Amino acid sequence: MNKQIFALTIVASLLPIAANADTPKMSQEIIQQTVDKYGAIYCKEGLGAMQEAIQECYKNTSETSKKLDQCMLADQAAGMIATRKILKDESNHSINDPEAYDSYLSSHTFNLRQKYYRSAARFKQDPVFGKLDNFAVYNYFPNISNLPEKFTERCPDISIKLP
């Protein structure tokens, strides 16, 4: 009897690991394509142009399309870049007025947008994603702290470096 309980305990402890193995992750190819496209826009034209390209991406992409992944990843990177710039400005100039910045890239607006698109048909109607909870869908996107650096590899930006 003790051996059976021990075996069941081991199997039960492995279930979360097996479940995580089935959780999809965004492919490195999609990440690199997004970095190449939107990183080039950021480097050539700046954060405002990157923001406009992201807005166009959302506008021109069906909520069932896998291309939505790229819009969302670029959006995440732009928000992180903007946040780092704001933090750098505040530490250098004591700017504390949130209205001094573009509200589109604010963390509050970004979080609302991400929540909205994570509940889009792309994820809800997909045979794999449709079975996942919101946390698992959230984890599909790379949550890497160096995302801003990935998007600025072509034009290193000192204003987003963390201390």
Image: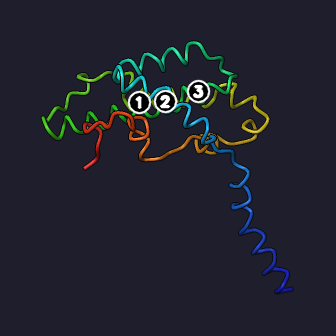
Element type at mark 3: helix
Q: Which quadrant does the N terminus fall into?
A: bottom right
Residue 60 percent location from the top left of the image: 59, 13
Residue 17 percent location from the top left of the image: 69, 61
Q: Which residue is mark 2?
A: 74
- Name the residue rendered at 22%, 38% in the picture: 88
Residue farthest along the left direction in this orientation? 93
Crowdedness of circle 2 by 10 Å Cα count: few (<14), some, many (20+)?
many
* Side of 80 relative to 129 (left or right): left
The image quarter containing residue 70 is top right
* Side of 136 relative to 76 (left or right): right
Element type at mark 2: helix
* Disc on res. 117: 3
Check contact, mark 3 vs mark 1: CB within 8 A. no
In the rendered view, would you say 85 is above or below 1?
A: above
Element type at mark 1: helix
Q: Amino acid at mark 2?
A: Ala
The front one of 66 and 120 is 66
* Disc on res. 78: 1
Residue 128 percent location from the top left of the image: 76, 39
Check contact, mark 1 vs mark 2: CB within 8 A. yes
Coloration of the structure image: rainbow
Marks 1/2: CA–CA distance: 6 Å
Q: Amino acid at mark 1?
A: Ala
